Image (cartoon, grey):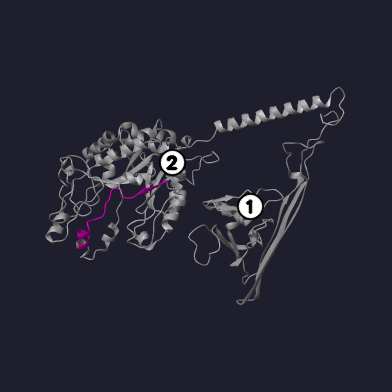
Amino acid sequence: MPLNGRSYADLTLLTPGVAKSPLENGTDSSRDASYHVNGGRSELNNFLLDGIDNNAYGTSNQGFSNQVIQPNPDALAEFKVETNNYSAEFGRATGAVINATIKSGTNQFHGEAWEFLRNTDLNAVGFFKPVGGGTLPFNQNQFGGAAGGPILKQKMFFFADYEGFRRVSHLLQFATVPTADSDIPGQTTPGRSEADILTRMATHKLVLFAAVMLSIAAAAASTPTADNARMNQVQVLGSHNSYKLAIDPSLLSLLKKGGDKRLDALEYSHVPIERQLDMGLRALEIDVVYDPQGGRYSHPKGIDLVAENHLPPGAPYDPYGEMKKPGFKVMHIPDIDFRTNAYTFQQELALLKAWSNAHPHHLPIPITMNAKDDGVKRPGFTALLKFDKAAFDAWDAEILAGLGRDRVITPDDVRGNYPTLEQAVLAQAWPTLGSARGKFFFVLDETGQKLDTYVEGHPSLRGRVMFTNSTEGHPEAAFRIVNEAQRDAAYIQYLVRSGYYVRTRADSDTVEARKGDYTRWQQALISGAQVISTDYYVADPAFGTGYHVQLPGGQAGRWNPLLLPDDWPLPAIE
């Protein structure tokens, strides 16, 4: 097994969120199996061997391993590493649970023996060659064996193993000693008085002090800045259907009379978008319907249904006639789920621009968008207009008119001189944070015919304003929407490491909020997806679970755990 030192526990480093502790430093005082898991201290991990406590880390911080017994890899049948969402049986640790199982005998005899050798004769000379040539002695042997078999076939078995470790080594050390004519106060030096010596020592101290201060100034001048990192190296929290208000209570009760459980998924709402941004969210979702003439969605059918059933009406709808103006309108489901924080797309863009003007240093804000053209197919309900090329052209134009070209990151900005957009992102050519601050970028969250229509005539999205949810292998692929963080965690990590921007979800359809289940949220965090969408950045008291999510530390963004910058310490993001 290719493990330097043959410590099986080193394989935990293959698990996301695990880093080696400085205590395991490869020296003679190194402490085996010392790992930081999700930022926790190394002594917070729980080592189990055949289900028995195998922890050796005491408060005195002594010893050379975090395990009482350090089984060799050939003695193990398997081991498992869990870093979150433990079952109730693993309750003592806040770090990882490393659960190892020893092999057992079988109905046949099996055995093995090994010798891992390091010898001076096989070593290269180090950087500092010892006086007289040659290399420093270093001889190490790891040897042992394991055997198992039956005592009573089908009933009783045995298994035993042994590993020995022997090392003989010499270390090269350096020391500074005074020469015979060194300037030492109190010692007679030919031709020099003690006053001369003390003066020279004071001068040396001043020079040393000046050098130290210059080093500090140079370090301060070279303090790492977040602006040099790429925008895809940040992970942010966003809201899903960010514009949505609650369905009118009377209308919701009327709709639920049919017993349709799907309506449970609509029981959520959001504060105004600018308030969401004030709370630290840095990703949004906006849905629009096409209304080039204006007035098509100005009188929702749901208002009539409430009146016909003599139920208490909701708040006045569109009192200033915004819905009668031409342009894209913002809503979730026309005629039913039509309450929104802003009636028109231009209103939303104006709110975003005003907030950005007040916070010019903000992180780039991705906005995913749906083209709604499939309404309720019943008599009396509004027939939605389809999104054709003219609709998509008008949509791009509204984005630029509402925010200004200088506020929008487009596919052309990312592609640069690369032949295709996908080649640019695979080369990690996303703009730097410094150039992307104070800007927005839009993503068309559609597939099939709508996606094809938007891309048609714009290979690699040349001249288009929005990115698309195009799959890998297409010239337009740059932003991927993969909502199932639990099922597709490995796929998301692959996409992120490859260079794609990814959005996933922490919850959906009120399911996690009703149960108080954070499993999907935790998987989303460690997946490395740059955008994690939620309906619950604040808890909904109606569910009684307290479910809500926020990034660790409550910040507007954090460094992506899969794409950490090279600078250390990590600079502040926003």
Would you place residue 134 above or below residue 180 in this image? Answer: below
- Residue 356 visible somewhere in the drawing: yes
**Could you say which quadrant of the image residue 326 lies in?**
top left
Q: Magenta stretch containing residue 314, yes or no?
A: no
Give the extent of the magenta segment.
236-253
Would you place residue 275 above or below residue 248 in this image? Answer: above
Q: Nearer the viewer, mark 1 or mark 2?
A: 2
Question: What residue is shown with label 1?
Answer: 3
Specify the quadrant that holds the N terminus.
Answer: bottom right
Q: CA distance from mark 1 to mark 2?
A: 33 Å
Residue 50: x and y, percent?
A: 60, 67
Q: Magenta stretch containing residue 250, yes or no?
A: yes
Question: What residue is shown with label 2?
Answer: 232
Instruction: Identify the mark nearer the N-term, 1 or 2.
Output: 1
Q: Secondary structure at mark 2?
A: helix
For residue 284, which numbered disc appears in the image? none
Which amino acid type is shown beneath numbered disc 1? Leu
